[in-house]
Image (cartoon, rainbow, N blue to C red):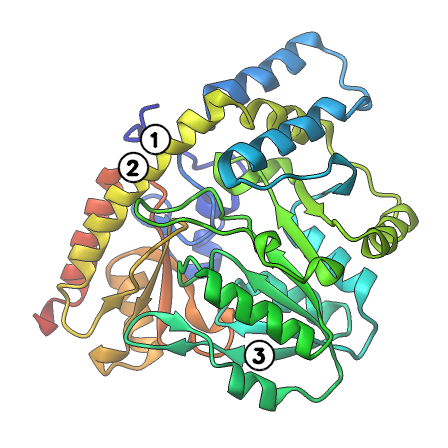
Amino acid sequence: MNFDEIIDRRGTHNVKWDEMQAIYGVSPDDGLAMWVADMDFAAPDCVREAIHNQANHGVMGYFGNDGPYRDAICWWMENRHGWSVDPKSIFTTHGLVNGTALCVDAFTNVGDGVVLFTPVYHAFARVIRAAGRNVVECQLVNNNGRYEYDFDAYDAQMTGSERMVILCSPHNPGGRVWSKAELEAVAAFAKRHNLILVSDEIHHDLIMPGHTHIPMTKIDGIEDRLVMMTATTKTFNIAGSHSGNVIIADPDLRAKFAARMAALGLSPNSFGLFMAMAAYSPEGAAWVDELCIYLDGNRRLFDEGVNAIPGVKSMALESTYLAWVDFEGTGMTRDEFTSRVQTAAKIAPNHGPSFGLGGENFLRFNLATPRSRIEDAVGRLKAAFSDLQ
């Protein structure tokens, strides 16, 4: 795979490049799109071939016999994550934002509290509030550029109205790969407060060298309250397929979720299933291994550049392709450092406050783009903050 290839995405109805001017005031003609969490790389050949085969077949009918699809998921989780999945425990949703919304709908009621460890992926709070539930923000501790938990503080925040906690593992936007001890502490917190634990592990394949992701399902004693969420979409850059998996081992929780799926008349997009079967394969695995090495190179290049700007600090990235950059040390207001990035550097990043408490002084940069663009971005940022150097 040639990850250095520049693919012009402008004018292809994609959010990342075609809407950044309307949202950030950055023109796609001379700006860099570094916000939406999809990659500027083509999907693996095996995935593209699967779609070509369906298009060439010509009949786009209903999908049947999903046994091979479930088997592909089970093969991937066993071989890549050491996790044995029961095929009957798998539900396919229209992506994991939809999966999150369905969990909120199935396991909580209007007015209930849903706990988030913030700053965290912004769509969680959006769907929780849209469903009439309350977002309970338990702020992560930024310990010298590394996020950690403070469960004494979180315990004190609980009122008894909370019914669910959503974990982002690995963490977006901070890039943490949570340790076994940290996952055990999250599980203990959920048990103490009788919370359903939804673990969104969409980034679990995008791990930097030297780190190992531990699926939450490997933590003992929480099967009766655990909902796992995974997807091919981030791993293989096929987010437009809008497919994801909610995997529930506990039969009672599974029955509740199945009832909501049935009541809403949901069934999967066949193209997402064809792509997933092709992706979860030895060919897909080899592509992901290459991808992670390339992303690590982008990470090192980006961090070296931005960390050389006085007062700017990129969190050490253990997973994902999303750099979380702290501008507090510049002494600038949020409006000022954001303007320098968007207006002077002509880069469109995600704004930190959208991720909740703790994100006020941050911007998130997507590094899943050809390396020449990372070099360009670093040069632009150094120029935009040149008066500090």
**Secondary-structure class at tag 1:** helix
Report the residue marked by disc 3. 137
Q: What amino acid type should be assigned to the residue bearing mark 2?
A: Tyr
Up the image or down, 367 lies above or below 272; here it is below
Q: Is residue 160 left or right of residue 47?
A: right
The residue shown at (70%, 89%) is 159
Q: Position of residue 51 (x, y in %)?
A: 60, 19
Q: Is residue 360 visible?
A: no
Report the residue marked by disc 2. 294
The answer to whether marks 1 and 2 mark residues whose Cβ atoms lie closer than 8 Å is yes
The residue shown at (82%, 22%) is 64
Report the residue marked by disc 1. 290
Q: What amino acid type should be assigned to the residue bearing mark 3?
A: Glu
- Please report whichever mark, 3 or 2, sits nearer to the chain's N-terminal start: 3
Q: In this view of the protein, which residue sits in the foreground, 65 or 274?
A: 65
Classed neighbour count for the residue bearing mark 1: other residues with Cα under 10 Å, few (<14), some (14–19), many (≥20): few
Task: Identify the image quadrant of the N terminus.
Answer: top left
- Please report whichever mark, 1 or 3, sits nearer to the chain's N-terminal start: 3
Q: Is residue 328 visible?
A: yes
Mark number displayed over residue 128:
none
Q: What amino acid type should be assigned to the residue bearing mark 1?
A: Glu
* Image quarter of residue 112: bottom right
Q: Is residue 85 left or right of residue 89?
A: left
Classed neighbour count for the residue bearing mark 2: other residues with Cα under 10 Å, few (<14), some (14–19), many (≥20): some
The residue shown at (54%, 38%) is 13
The answer to whether marks 1 and 3 mark residues whose Cβ atoms lie closer than 8 Å is no
The answer to whether marks 3 and 2 mark residues whose Cβ atoms lie closer than 8 Å is no
As measured in the structure, the alpha-carbon distance from the residue carrying label 1 to the one carrying label 2 is 6 Å
As measured in the structure, the alpha-carbon distance from the residue carrying label 3 to the one carrying label 2 is 34 Å
Q: Position of residue 82 (x, y in %)?
A: 53, 40
